[in-house]
Amino acid sequence: MGVSDNTFGGGGSGLSPLEAARREKLRRLEELGIDPWGHRFDGHQAIAAIRAREGEIQAIPSGDCAVGQPPELRGPRVRAAGRIMLLRRAGKIMFLDLRDWSAKIQVLIGKVQVGETNWQLAQCLDLGDLLGVDGELKRTKTGELTIFAEDLTFLSKSIETPPEKWHGLTDPELRNRMRYLDLAYTDGVMQRFLQRTKIVQSIRQTLGDEGFVEVEGPTLHTVAGGAAARPFVTHHNALDMDLFLRIALELHLKRLLVGGIERVYELGRVYRNEGISPRHNPEFTMLEVYQAYGDYRTMMDLTERLIVRAIEATDRPLQLPWGETVIDFTPPFARRRYDDLLREYLGVDPGDPASLKGCAAARGLQTGTKHPDVVKNELFEEFVQPQLAGPIFVMDYPASICPLTKRKPGSPEIAERFELFVQGMELANAYTELNDPDLQERLFSLQLEGLAEEESMARMDRDFIRALRYGMPPAGGLGIGIDRLVMLLTNCQSIREVILFPLYRPEG
């Protein structure tokens, strides 16, 4: 794709009037001996911390003031750095709004107060420039908390004109493509991603407090196992072999259970070569946790603790807005059996293949030669799942669609598995892990009738089977989609709003 000479600020006759004006100010800064790209600026405080010092502002006793004049204010000396978001000039005084990643504050620049050199610098300021300010924290006559500038430090020039305040970056795709502008200029975006960080930190803290250790597994796999998904394929030149970007974390973490790491987790990226939707991105962040000598009930309790503590880490109540409704995350979350929900919502007999087939046909689903459990799961995903407001643990799935899961004692047709649904969206998936190597080998070889290859876990990982033969302890395993969790906890309807750099086709 061709680009013009000035696309990346190369100058030339094709400059827009707005960019030409900004470049002229850049030139004037250089004439003043000021580096327009700035230098180290030590000792500045976050603006939120500066605002928190408002209580240190004091009025000079009235006896020291002229009769009839309001008392003069004295405040602490402060140093701030941030981006200029608003700029107003009025003769020998300028007001600007300065914002960093914590908050925003007004700055007053007076020609007399800052001196001639600083005043000349101030004439070169534009919206979007980065500026350092030293001054006194006080309030204006209207009560606005303000830094009264005494010295200015230019930190970086913005050659491009930022989005307009009221009609700027509103296109969702443009915001996601240009996340740097979205963070800088769209209200609430910075706070959302800082909340995401708090959520992830809380998850690590909770798991660490309970004795789990974090590891880093390989992202290049020789077998695309651990989930039902289509992988991305790449090629290793030196070894002359195809490899897969991982679609799950599971099988390598369970190898570590065999090795004796009894509580283990990984929080990392996985990749699935599938469609893009408001709830799907080709690369996403997954948490997988494994606990020796636990089961899927152990994982239910852990899931509740992880989510509740993550909400608490963002300093918000357990009742959170979601669109026009509210989700109540107060534990314990509801727990319902898979078959019971099918019976309740569809009036079907989950154990009768004829009943399932008739129900599917009545709702326009093609059954053909599909395995009854495949039909059952399609009915659940199409007609039950969207109605689950949650949070609700759906437990005890058909064993035939859960090849990595231990069977329920006395009910070999039932797998000890749960999925957590919130507002019809799958958020977590957990098993009592299968540790019988012979059964696991048979299940890896089983392709259910009517199930597409990319939707099957029938991929033989022979080294994993070999690991199981050395003895894996009974265990509970859990997977949580971090991006979806952040969506739910920050009231975002699209997964692209909580991923810093979601995938798009190249521009043009």
Image (spheres, rainbow, N blue to C red):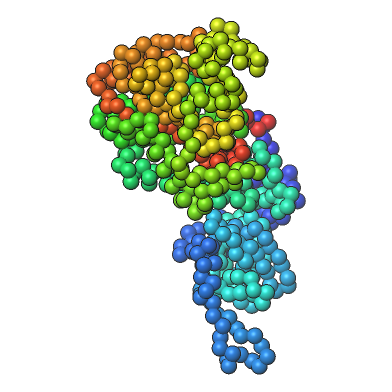
* Residue lying furthest right: 17
- Residue 69 lies left or right of residue 410; in this view the side is right
Query: 345 or 129: nearer the eye?
Result: 345
Query: 72 or 323: nearer the eye?
Result: 323
State the residue at coordinates (49%, 37%): 334
Question: Quarter of the image containing the N terminus?
Answer: top right
State the residue at coordinates (26%, 18%): 469
Q: Position of residue 38 (x, y in %)?
A: 54, 58
How many circles with numbers are drawn on the protein? 0
- Residue 195 lies left or right of residue 494; in this view the side is left
Q: Position of residue 392 (x, y in %)?
A: 50, 35
Figure quadrant of residue 304: top left
Residue 314 visible within the image: yes
Q: Position of residue 306 (x, y in %)?
A: 42, 42
Asked if residue 341 is positioned above or below residue 448 in the image, the reply reads: below
State the residue at coordinates (36%, 42%): 207
Query: 346 or 489: nearer the eye?
Result: 346
- Residue 344 lies left or right of residue 364; in this view the side is left
* Residue lying furthest top: 369
Figure quadrant of residue 342: top right
Q: Position of residue 419 (x, y in %)?
A: 47, 30
Residue 19 visible within the image: no
State the residue at coordinates (66%, 40%): 172
Asked if residue 175 is positioned above or below residue 43 in the image, the reply reads: above
Asked if residue 137 is positioned above or below residue 331 in the image, the reply reads: below
Question: Quarter of the image containing the C terminus?
Answer: top right
Query: 62 or 409: nearer the eye?
Result: 409
- Residue 257 lies left or right of residue 336; in this view the side is left
